[in-house]
Amino acid sequence: MSDVVFRKGEHVLLRPLQRADIPAMRRWMNDPETTQFRLARAFPLMEKAQEEWLDRLSGSTTEFGLGIVTIEDNELIGWIGLHEVDWAHRTATTSTTIGEADHLGKGYGSEAKMLMLDFAFNALDLYAIRSRVMDDNKRSLAYARKNGYEEVGRLPKWIRRQDGERCDEVVLVVTQEQWRPLWQEYLRNRRSPG
Ligand SMILES: CC(C)(COP(=O)(O)OP(=O)(O)OC[C@H]1O[C@@H](n2cnc3c(N)ncnc32)[C@H](O)[C@@H]1OP(=O)(O)O)[C@@H](O)C(=O)NCCC(=O)NCCS
């Protein structure tokens, strides 16, 4: 297991991103399969840009990045971010990428999000988190709803997909109050972390 543990769940743990993660992250963030659902335009991502981004994260209190590591194999499979933390309004946004394709759809993203929301709501006492998702990204919509997010609106045909078709941008929000019962249920159901 990683010696640095920021949050530990049943199947994955979260730990701060580090320089050694850059090659894997660069592989994921340049892979069209992984980036097809990103709302930020997927331009080629170079090593220097990623190093600079990581340096900016290290001193930030408005943006946090954590690696998602499987507990069983100690493998870095993705990363999760808490972005745009607004201390006046106590709101933020999140993003998640499971970069290793054979680990998609195994519940790792949902647990990583639950652990990130533990940080956002229990530790930082934020009020609400927003997520913006392409309407075509059914897995991301399912996983957001599983974590308590509700659709609050949509921007029709706002997104131009990589194949040139347009689709809606869905805006989802979860408040601390909505999330708290899910957190209690998660704690009841997970085997106690060792
Ligand atoms: C979105 C993402 C983070 C979800 O993580 P994940 O580990 O793959 O998802 P989970 O296994 O936790 O599944 C969450 C829910 O989605 C459902 N789901 C899984 N695959 C699905 C699919 N292809 N279509 C619809 N729903 C799906 C699951 O059934 C699960 O719900 P359930 O437990 O109630 O059955 C991950 O798929 C990912 O990184 N995708 C690529 C990048 C991306 O789209 N990021 C989000 C941009 S907004």
Image (spheres, rainbow, N blue to C red):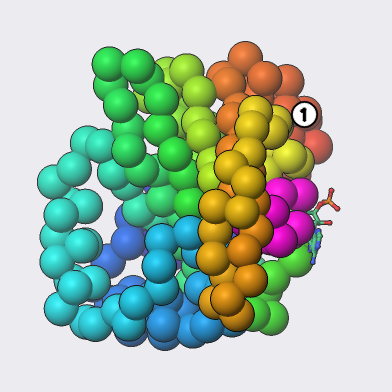
Q: Quadrant of residue 182?
A: top right
Q: Which amino acid, by three-letter code, is at mark 1?
A: Glu
Crowding around mark 1 (Cα neighbors within 10 Å: few <14, some 14 to 19, many 20+) is few
Residue 72 visible in the picture: yes
- Residue 61: percent from left, percent from top: 22, 36
* Image point (34%, 77%), residue name: 43
Tell me: 156 left or right of 84: right
Circle 1 — which element? helix
Can you tell me which quadrant of the image ligand 1 is in? bottom right
Q: Which residues are magenta?
A: 134-143
Mark 1, residue position = 185
State whether the magenta stretch is mostly helix, strand or loop: helix
In-front residue for pair 18/82: 82
Asked if residue 76 is positioned above or below residue 186 in the image, the reply reads below
- Residue 189: percent from left, percent from top: 80, 37
* Image point (69%, 33%), residue name: 151
Residue 132 included in the magenta stretch of the image: no
